[in-house]
Image: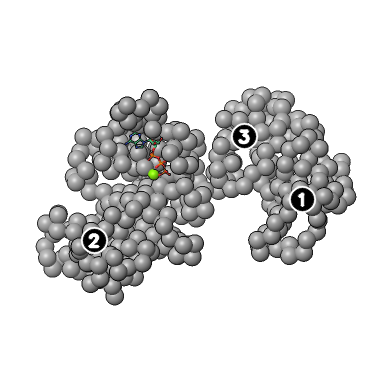
Amino acid sequence: MGEHAGLDYLSIRSLRKIYPKTSAPAVNDVNLDVRRGDLVALLGPSGCGKTTTLRMVAGLLEPSSGEIFVDGSDVVSTPVHKRGMGMVFQSYALFPHLTVEENVAFGLQMHRVPRGEISARVSQALDNVQLGHLAKRKPAALSGGQQQRVALARALVIQPTLLLLDEPLSNLDAKLREAMRKEIRAIQQESGTTTLFVTHDQDEALDMADRIAILNNGVIEQYDSPSAIYENPATRFVANFVGKANFIDVETRSSPSGGKYSVESALFGKLTVRGAPGIDASAALVVRPHRVSVAAKDERAGSLPSARARVRATSYTGNVRSYDLMLESGELMRADQLSAPDEQFRIGDEAYVSFEPDDAYLVSEC
Ligand SMILES: Nc1ncnc2c1ncn2[C@@H]1O[C@H](COP(=O)(O)OP(=O)(O)OP(=O)(O)O)[C@@H](O)[C@H]1O
Ligand SMILES: [Mg+2]
């Protein structure tokens, strides 16, 4: 129906929320299109408006202004129970007095699904999250990860029009979290359920999402595929929030020709680099730590941008050895070496850092 029918299943237009008795909007002007069957991660720091956005989509919170289209229809005035959405909250919010299977059956009973069909769908949903054997338990007798999976089964069993997940893995340990990521993604893809997934964990977003929306102060700063968010960040905020980043202050000398900018850095000199569109004088170069090389001698001089530095700190985490290097300008730069068990430099050593200009990316300061 209408102009929003196409590929996008969920379309959010100029969505805004100002809570009573507050001055700054919690959600300022959110626009987002989610393709049918996609999982989109809403990623951003604490307090940026993720839960507020999700609750407006669910119908639990009334927008101050803006529109929300699902499959072409504006749902803003549709009550929550008629939207047919499944939601997993930041806390799992299971019913403590009901068993696992009764928890999962609850939504189907509300929708007056016939009893025989309920039991078939509940056992299928529990099998999907590998909890069939715990159907008769109460939530208090389950681990956090198991409760999490009950909440997920409860949201999925109603075959929701949209699946809304609010940091569903935040209380799990690292191993279980990773296993659950794969499980949620597999179930979501198999069922083709369009999903909005709120997280402040960049790894989770990169790992699971078809596209990522980076939310900052109630506004989406960038909406792109995981690799585009990481490789071509639109702003300094995005580059800093997703992955580790070195920033080199530069002056932009000329606007892009052939998609490249001419810039000048005090230490690294004149460079031709790729960058986000529409950048003016105030900009920074992003170089990811694993793309910075460190050498004892300035062997790169002349061929690559390089600068003298002093090693300030080193760290080792098994797969990566990192050096924090202080440049002569006083700026710090981090270099990550993969699979480098032996320490090459010690604190206080002099070293030269360099990078390929094609591995740098120009971003706006805000
Ligand atoms: N009921 C409320 N009344 C007033 N302000 C609120 C209310 N709920 C949230 N806020 C404010 O709105 C802003 C956005 O909150 P929200 O819960 O959407 O953030 P979030 O991105 O989900 O954060 P987190 O990652 O910590 O869950 C915050 O500044 C918060 O303090
Ligand atoms: Mg939240």
Residue at 66% across / 46% down in the picture? 288
Q: Which residue is mark 2?
A: 96
Q: Quadrant of the N terminus?
A: top left
Disc 3 and disc 1: Cα gap in Å?
21 Å
Pair 1/2: label in front: 2
Which residue is more in the foreground, 307 or 227? 307
Disc 1 and disc 2: Cα gap in Å?
55 Å
Residue at 48% across / 36% down in the picture? 216
Q: Position of residue 67 (x, y in %)?
A: 30, 32
Q: Position of residue 165 (x, y in %)?
A: 35, 51
Q: Which residue is mark 1?
A: 293
Total residue callouts: 3
Q: Position of residue 321 (x, y in %)?
A: 71, 58
Q: Would you call the spot at circle 3 few (<14 residues within 10 Å), some (14-19), or many (20 or more)?
A: many
| N-terminal-most mark, 3 or 1 | 1
Residue 195 shows in the view:
no
| Left or right placement of residue 38 versus residue 345 in this view | left
Which residue is more in the foreground, 3 or 130? 130
* Kind of residue sitting beneath label 1: Ser
Q: Which residue is mark 3?
A: 363
Secondary element at image label 3: strand
Disc 3 and disc 2: Cα gap in Å?
49 Å
| Left or right placement of residue 119 versus residue 299 in this view | left
Secondary element at image label 2: loop
* Kind of residue sitting beneath label 3: Val
Residue at 18% across / 68% down in the picture? 119
* Kind of residue sitting beneath label 2: Pro
Which residue is more in the foreground, 16 or 188? 16
Pair 3/2: label in front: 2
Secondary element at image label 1: strand
Q: Would you call the spot at circle 1 few (<14 residues within 10 Å), some (14-19), or many (20 or more)?
A: some
